Image (cartoon, grey):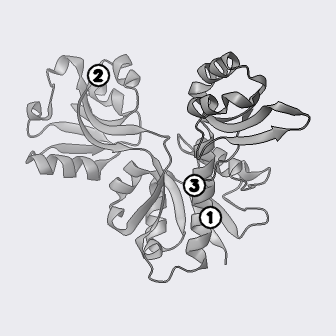
């Protein structure tokens, strides 16, 4: 049974999605960048390259089985009640917010008056937000470059995705209020996720999800190996507890030393090595990890 996966065909989510799939062992082939879809080598998996904003509708309709897109796209699509977020991917992190020109005097949602014009590519979320506040605003749909719309006189405010806020600052705008937080995630339909008797399709989807999860788990970890004095094992276990404890191996021809193998957080590597050296560690080796299955 071939399972269909959709990923964004371009933009902020495409590159990282492809990277995660490749690191997970899913071979897209050499010419994937020039094709609308590819079949993963030696797997019953087809990868479709689709606009991020279209992926929620295709999952809901059953045209594809699961997909990678932004939570903002799902919320805007109106299909959120039909889709299941099975894994947050921790990239494409941003927030959908209302922003105003610095000179507008608007500092919060309560300062926004009825009749205010708002330019956005998220009209549904924008309307829903202001409806919840009991405010009537005029929404102008734009496909991009929302920051220039107040300058052109097209709108008074904008509703757009914000990551660092640097683009707003460059264009002399300030964030007024947040509507939702967002990041990239893997979605499938609730029909598939909650079927009473999961079939092969669901298992194939979860195999891909768990492969990606293992790649993400490994990215901020290193595999450390070192020879240490046997009498220092207890102290070493406190320094490098690992996932379920370090692996301790006997060294051939040396009864006084043992080999320690352990997974260590990358950010802790410098201090860890320093501490191990003080305990008499030798032959310290650090390696990257491709996948970490817990």
Residue shown at the point (54%, 41%) measured from the top left: 11
Q: Position of residue 238 (x, y in %)?
A: 56, 32
* Residue wearing tag 1: 207
Q: Secondary structure at mark 2?
A: strand
Q: Secondary structure at mark 1?
A: helix
| Distance (Cα) linking label 1 and label 3 | 17 Å
For residue 189, side relative to residue 19 (left or right): left
| Distance (Cα) linking label 1 and label 2 | 44 Å
When the figure is inspected, residue 154 is found, relative to residue 17, above or below; the finding is: above
Q: Secondary structure at mark 3?
A: strand
10 Å crowding of disc 1: few (<14), some (14-19), many (20+): few
Q: Position of residue 220 (x, y in %)?
A: 59, 35
10 Å crowding of disc 3: few (<14), some (14-19), many (20+): many
Q: Position of residue 28 (x, y in %)?
A: 74, 55
The dot on residue 73 is none
* Residue wearing tag 2: 173
Residue shown at the point (57%, 26%) measured from the top left: 267
* Residue wearing tag 3: 7
Residue shown at the point (62%, 71%) measured from the top left: 3
When the figure is inspected, residue 143 is found, relative to residue 104, above or below; the finding is: below
Number of callouts in the render? 3
Q: Quadrant of residue 273?
A: top right
For residue 78, side relative to residue 84 (left or right): left
When the figure is inspected, residue 54 is found, relative to residue 289, above or below; the finding is: below
10 Å crowding of disc 2: few (<14), some (14-19), many (20+): many
For marks 1 and 2 on the same chain, the one whose residue lies earlier in the sequence: 2
For marks 1 and 3 on the same chain, the one whose residue lies earlier in the sequence: 3
* Residue 10 visible in image: yes
- Say whether marks 1 and 3 touch (CB < 8 Å): no
| Distance (Cα) linking label 2 and label 3 | 32 Å
Q: Position of residue 30 (x, y in %)?
A: 80, 50
């Amino acid at each position: 049974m071939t399972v269909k996966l959709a990923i964004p065909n371009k933009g902020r989510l495409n590159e990282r999605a492809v990277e995660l799939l490749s690191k997970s062992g899913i071979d897209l082939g050499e010419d994937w960048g020039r094709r609308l879809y590819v079949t993963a080598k030696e797997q019953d998996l087809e990868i479709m390259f689709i606009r991020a904003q279209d992926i929620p509708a295709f999952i809901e309709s059953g045209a594809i089985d699961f997909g990678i897109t932004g939570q903002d796209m799902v919320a805007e699509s109106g299909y959120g009640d039909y889709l299941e977020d099975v894994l947050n991917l921790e990239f494409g992190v941003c927030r959908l917010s209302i922003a105003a020109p610095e000179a507008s005097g608007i500092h919060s949602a309560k300062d926004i008056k009825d009749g205010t014009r708002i330019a956005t590519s998220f009209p549904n979320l924008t309307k829903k937000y202001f409806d919840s506040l009991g405010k009537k605003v005029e929404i102008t749909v734009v496909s991009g470059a929302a920051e220039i719309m107040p300058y052109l006189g097209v709108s008074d405010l904008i509703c757009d995705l914000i990551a660092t806020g640097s683009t707003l600052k460059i264009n002399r705008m300030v964030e007024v209020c947040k509507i939702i937080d967002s990041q990239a995630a893997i979605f499938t339909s609730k029909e598939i996720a909650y079927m009473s008797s999961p079939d092969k399709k669901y298992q194939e989807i979860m195999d891909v999800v768990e492969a990606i999860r293992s790649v993400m788990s490994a990215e901020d970890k290193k595999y450390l190996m070192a020879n240490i004095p046997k009498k220092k094992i207890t102290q070493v276990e406190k320094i490098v507890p690992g996932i379920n404890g370090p692996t301790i191996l006997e060294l051939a021809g040396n009864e006084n030393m043992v080999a320690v193998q352990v997974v260590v957080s990358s950010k802790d590597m410098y201090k860890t090595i320093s501490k191990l050296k003080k305990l008499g560690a030798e032959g310290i080796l650090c390696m990257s990890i491709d996948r970490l299955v817990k």
